[in-house]
Image: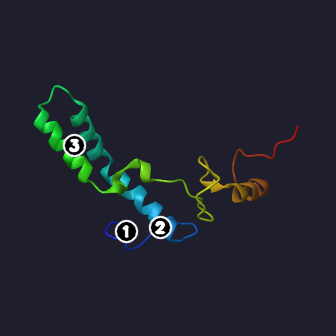
Amino acid sequence: MSQFRAKTLDIASFINIRVIRDHTKRKVFAEHETERQALRYIIRNTTLPQRMRAQAQLQLSQMHAYTRGTQITNRCIEGGKGRGVFRDFRMARYPFRMNALDGNLPGVRKASW
């Protein structure tokens, strides 16, 4: 959503709307993670009164979708692709292969047996 989007982006990669949206989701999730965890703890705590737990559940359900961790998808930092992305390097298959062959990725070597 545009209400969360920053005016300036601190992204040093390929930029398209999907990358910007993913970057926004990651920032919003990081900001609201502790609040969501606290509400989830209150909801699951059976020693608390039922009314307090119901209020916490209502607050949690009214939070924006970008505050959920499931909204975040791994995207390639070079091409912005959303499929075939190596999680450890945040790169798609082809850019990963090219960077590995050029020696730009530390600890990655072409296999030979």
**Disc 3 residue type (three-letter):** Gln
Q: How is the image coloured?
A: rainbow
Q: Residues within 10 Å of mark 1 (few under 14, many from 20)?
A: some
Q: Mark 1 touching mark 3, by CB under 8 A?
A: no
Residue 43 relative to residue 88: left or right: left
Instruction: In the rendered view, tell whether residue 7 sits above or below residue 56.
Output: below
Nearest the eye: 55 or 91: 55
Residue beneath disc 2: 20
Task: Say which element carries label 2.
Answer: helix
Looking at the rendering, in which quadrant would you find the C terminus? top right
Q: Residue at x 16, y 40 (%)?
A: 54
Residue 57's label in the rendered image is 3
Instruction: Give the quarter of the image for residue 4.
Output: bottom left
| Nearer mark to the viewer, of 1 and 3 | 3
Q: Position of residue 55 (x, y in %)?
A: 15, 43
The answer to whether residue 42 shows anywhere in this view is yes
Task: Say which element carries label 3.
Answer: helix
Instruction: Give the quarter of the image for residue 78.
Output: bottom right
Mark 1 → mark 3, Cα distance in angstroms? 27 Å
Task: Say which element carries label 1.
Answer: loop
Nearest the eye: 31 or 17: 17
Q: Mark 2 touching mark 1, by CB under 8 A?
A: yes
Extreme residue toward the top, this view: 47
Q: Position of residue 34 (x, y in %)?
A: 29, 45
The answer to whether residue 104 shows anywhere in this view is no
Q: Earlier in the sequence, mark 2 or mark 3?
A: 2
Nearest the eye: 73 or 62: 62
Q: Residue at x 30, y 51 (%)?
A: 32
**Disc 1 residue type (three-letter):** Arg
Q: Position of residue 94 (x, y in %)?
A: 72, 58
Mark 2 → mark 1, Cα distance in angstroms? 8 Å
